[in-house]
Amino acid sequence: MRKFILFAATAVGLTATAACEPVEDAPPVQGADARGGENGASTKKAKPPIGLAAKRTTAERSILSEGGALTCVKVTVANNAKKKVEINPLYFAITGTDSVKHDTGDALGEYEGQIATTDIAPGEKAKGVVCVKGKFVPKTVSMTNPLFSTAARAAVAS
């Protein structure tokens, strides 16, 4: 009986320890270092499953706009995986140079050219604009998957 209790206590301890481990790390920021490997030498890397590129832009206001400042980024999402990728404007967030992450949900309907809610097949791309309320300098854009874990991150080009 003592062996069973010791075994059970050990199993529970290992399970509790494993549950505290992070499930996944955030993906690296794409486009952050164009030089590549050591001393600027180019190294060939495998494409990430979801490619994300971002560039600062200004968006045209929609008729539903309530006014106020918007910070906008034009994004391109590429599906490099072997299964479809779901795209939704609510899956994006913009982080400023002040390290504050801003949610895109507050600015939905405020601008034209919003990235569409769609699925893209392997090899396809989707382009559109994502905006957040407020005026700041965007540094990175992140995209989550339907389970709201980070799927891709990209540095924002000027």
Image (spheres, rainbow, N blue to C red):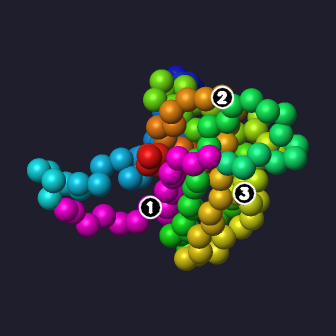
Is residue 48 covered in magenta? yes
Residue in the foreground of this view, choosing between 55 and 82:
55
Residues under numbered marks 1 and 3 in contact, where contact means CB atoms less than 8 Å apart: no
Residue carrying label 1 = 48
**Inter-mark Cα distance, 3 to 2:** 18 Å
Residue carrying label 2 = 134
Residue in the foreground of this view, choosing between 41 and 13:
41
Q: Residues within 10 Å of mark 2 (few under 14, many from 20)?
A: few
Assign a secondary structure to mark 1.
Answer: loop
Residue at 55 percent of width and 29 percent of height: 136
Residue carrying label 3 = 113
Residue in the foreground of this view, choosing between 58 and 137:
58
Q: Which residues are magenta?
A: 42-58
Q: Quadrant of residue 120?
A: bottom right
Q: Earlier in the sequence, mark 2 or mark 1?
A: 1
Residue at 51 percent of width and 70 percent of height: 80
Q: Nearer the viewer, mark 1 or mark 3?
A: 3
Q: Residues within 10 Å of mark 3 (few under 14, many from 20)?
A: some
Q: Is 34 placed left or right of 4 in the picture?
A: left
Whether residue 5 is situated above or below residue 120 in the rendered picture: above
What amino acid is found at the position of numbered circle 1 in the picture? Pro
Q: Residues within 10 Å of mark 1 (few under 14, many from 20)?
A: some
Residue 147 seen in the current view: no
Residue in the foreground of this view, choosing between 82 and 143:
143
Residue 105 in percent (x, y) is at: 75, 38
Q: Earlier in the sequence, mark 1 or mark 3?
A: 1
**Inter-mark Cα distance, 2 to 1:** 31 Å
